[in-house]
Image (cartoon, rainbow, N blue to C red):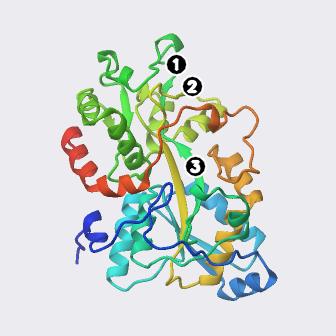
Amino acid sequence: MTRRKLSRREAIKGSAALGLTLFASPLKAQAPEPVAITPQLIDAATREGKVVLYSAMDLPVGEKLGNAFQARYQGIEVQIERSGSERLFQRVGQEYASNIHAADLITTADASHVISWKRSGWLAPFVPEDVAKYFPGEYRDADGTFAISRIWLSSIACNTDLVKPADAPASFADLLDPRWAGKMVKGHPAYSGTIMTATFQIVRELGWSYLEKLSKQRVMQVQSSTDPPKKLSLGERAIMADGNEYSVVLLKEAGQPVEPIYPAEGTPTITGPTAIFAAAPHPNAARLFQAWLHTRQTQQFFTDYTAQYSAHPQVTPKPGRRKISDIKLMKEDADGVEKMTDEIKTRYARLFRV
């Protein structure tokens, strides 16, 4: 039997609003005591023998992390279920509605998801020692139910074989120039949490009128935010209207003819929280993975490998890469994304006819 998809409004019906700097909460913050990685935690996790991660990360990235964890803690298998964030949100809602609890923890590219899951009581408070010691307050939940594992951008970009540097667009407004009609590619907010978050920020800053004009530019529509950089590097399109900046950086480092562009209006900023489910079938393995993921060593390994950014202040950019502090950014607002998700999906589909 085909399950009906839950709307975001249905998934959070009857819930009150939350609040932090990025997120919102009516409850007095009271996170549990920080937890270090101890022999006792490792033993308990090893006895469980497995951890199931629902992940919106690119599959190669998730697998790289999983393999690193398995090498560090032998005897614990990492099972990764990868999909776009918006699909994962639907999946979790459907599973919980059917009393299915398959995932131990989840990492999403749409930070508004944790607002809903926390409100529903689906997340288990757990504070890794490194998160408590080093992560700024805006990058961790005051109640301890999630932490921001990665930060990345949704930039524009160009294929340097097809676009001369002097001709490259420098802003979102430049993408409306008729010369780029039929030459652009972008992701879809109904599939990708990155594009959902970026679309919200663009609408907030530039208005729906901007997207209405962009939709008339015969833009190639793909699903994941990882797809536009690939289309760009293959020369299928000259301009990337949105998508993962880090993928463009990695392709450029690999010798592909691509160049990230940080628009004059500001570059949309995305944060990816990771959280443990309260009904996790392997709770100790989930806690160990969460603690390991947010150590300085893992965060440095992750940023070096992926060209993303970390909230851990001891992590430094790989030589040759830009610091996020040097880029003009649009401000993230996870609470705002949650409120506008259904509207964005509906209006975007109508404008781009997808």
Name the residue tied to disc 1.
Answer: 161
Q: Amino acid at mark 2?
A: Pro
Q: Relative to 262, is 136 on the left or the right?
A: right
How many numbered marks does the figure carry? 3
Q: Are marks 3 and 2 in contact (CB under 8 Å)?
A: no
* Circles 2 and 1 in contact, beta carbons < 8 Å: yes
Quadrant of image for the N terminus: bottom left
Q: Amino acid at mark 3?
A: Ile
Reading the image, the residue beneath label 3 is 151
Q: Is residue 170 left or right of residue 346?
A: right
Residue at figure coordinates x 73%, y 53% from the top left: 301
- The crowding category of the residue bearing disc 3, from other C-alpha atoms within 10 Å (few below 14, some 14 to 19, many at least 20), is some
**Identity of the residue drawn at 64% across and 29% down:** 255
Mark in the foreground, 1 or 3:
3
Q: Residues within 10 Å of mark 2 (few under 14, many from 20)?
A: some
Gap in Å between the C-alphas at discs 2 and 1?
6 Å
Q: Which quadrant holds the C terminus?
A: top left
Q: Amino acid at mark 1?
A: Asp
Q: Kindly state the secondary structure of the residue where label 2 is placed.
A: loop
User: What is the CA distance from the residue labelled 3 to the residue labelled 2?
Assistant: 25 Å
Q: Position of residue 118 (x, y in %)?
A: 45, 72
Furthest residue toward right? 39
First along the sequence among labels 2 and 1: 1
**Of marks 1 and 3, which one's residue comes earlier in the chain?**
3
Q: What secondary structure is marked by label 3?
A: strand
Q: Nearer the viewer, residue 158 or 235?
A: 158
Residue at x-position 44% and y-position 45%: 225
- Write down the residue under mark 2: 257
Secondary structure, mark 1, is loop
**Residue that appears at 32% across and 72% down:** 15
- What is the CA distance from the residue labelled 1 to the residue labelled 3? 29 Å
